Image (cartoon, rainbow, N blue to C red):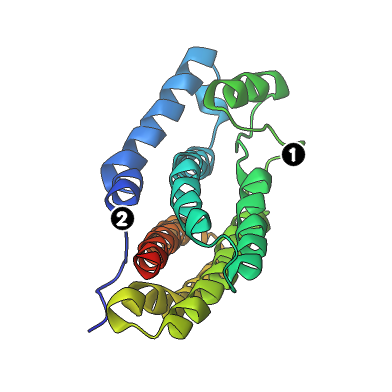
């Protein structure tokens, strides 16, 4: 039987827990209060920046899973496709880890530096394409891992990657649907959370499957 959704790992489940999201919001609100421009920020500034902070925390966890997979794929038939798809997916984080702040430029620069983000030229609350690109490129990447899992033909080792490959196109479509809705941004964070956890679980499971094949 396929695992229930969302497929996740312990580390990513903690990153995207409700308590982590609330803490990220509080951290940003506290930083805003210290600047004296708390009232210059919108609720969407807080929500979007909190979502990005969770993505920033998740990125090195995903990279760790990927290293485990890459180490087992040296010289393997699938390595070129996996590497290219991973690089495409990971690069989207560079574009998306942006502060969302509607206040002054100087304060935005200070906030971005504090949280390890980039302060964009203009607020991105109407530009959801960068976050969408993470989800959509993640769907492509997990499709590649799903193809690998199918090739392995071992149900016990391929169930999570195959379940993730079946799940990701729907998550990408859901994000794009939310993206075009008026005030659809509160719908996006749960989709992003589900997508990143699903991707991480698939990578971790695929790395374990490759290791088992070598033994």
Q: Label 1 neighbourhood size at 10 Å, few (<14), some (14-19), many (20+)?
A: few
Residue 79, compared with residue 159, is above or below; it is above
Q: Position of residue 143 (x, y in %)?
A: 54, 76
Q: Position of residue 28 (x, y in %)?
A: 46, 28
Of residues 89 and 32, the one nearer the viewer is: 89
What's the distance in space between the residues labelled 2 and 1, CA to CA? Answer: 35 Å
Q: Residue at x 67, y 59 (%)?
A: 88
Q: Position of residue 127 (x, y in %)?
A: 68, 54
Mark 2 falls on what kind of element? loop
- The tally of labels here is 2
Whether label 2 touches label 1, CB < 8 Å: no
Looking at the rendered structure, which numbered label has been put on residue 3?
A: none
Q: Can you tell which of label 2 and label 1 is closer to the viewer?
A: 2
Q: Is residue 193 left or right of residue 91?
A: left
Residue 90 visible within the image? yes
Residue 214, compared with residue 52, is above or below; it is below
Residue 39, compared with residue 84, is above or below; it is above
| Quadrant of the drawing holding the C terminus | bottom left
Of residues 153 and 164, the one nearer the viewer is: 153
Going from the N terminus, do you reach mark 2 or mark 1 first?
2
Q: Residue at x 66, y 44 (%)?
A: 94
- Which residue is disc 2 drawn over? 9
Mark 1 falls on what kind of element? loop
Looking at the rendered structure, which numbered label has been put on residue 122?
A: 1
| Quadrant of the drawing holding the N terminus | bottom left
Q: Residue at x 59, y 58 (%)?
A: 134
Q: Residue at x 29, y 45 (%)?
A: 14
Residue 74, compared with residue 45, is above or below; it is below
Q: Is residue 129 left or right of residue 52?
A: right
Residue 124 visible within the image? no
Q: Label 2 neighbourhood size at 10 Å, few (<14), some (14-19), many (20+)?
A: some
Of residues 30 and 213, the one nearer the viewer is: 213
């Amino acid at each position: 039987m396929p695992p229930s959704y969302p497929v996740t790992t312990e580390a990513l489940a903690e990153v995207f827990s409700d308590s982590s999201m609330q803490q990220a919001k509080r951290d940003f609100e506290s930083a805003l209060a210290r600047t004296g421009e708390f009232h210059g920020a919108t609720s969407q500034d807080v929500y979007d920046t909190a979502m990005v902070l969770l993505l920033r925390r998740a990125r090195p966890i995903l990279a760790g899973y990927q290293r485990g997979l890459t180490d087992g794929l040296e010289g393997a038939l699938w390595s070129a496709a996996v590497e290219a798809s991973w690089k495409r997916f990971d690069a989207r984080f560079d574009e998306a880890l942006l502060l969302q702040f509607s206040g002054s430029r100087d304060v935005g620069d200070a906030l971005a530096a504090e949280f390890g983000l980039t302060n964009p030229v203009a607020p991105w609350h109407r530009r959801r394409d960068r976050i969408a690109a993470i989800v959509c490129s993640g769907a492509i990447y997990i499709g590649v891992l799903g193809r690998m899992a199918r090739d392995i033909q071992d149900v016990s080792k391929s169930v999570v990657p195959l379940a993730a490959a079946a799940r990701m196109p729907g998550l990408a479509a859901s994000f794009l649907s939310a993206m075009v809705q008026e005030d659809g941004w509160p719908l996006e964070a749960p989709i992003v959370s589900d997508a990143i956890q699903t991707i991480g679980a698939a990578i971790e499971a695929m790395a374990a499957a490759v290791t088992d094949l070598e033994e």
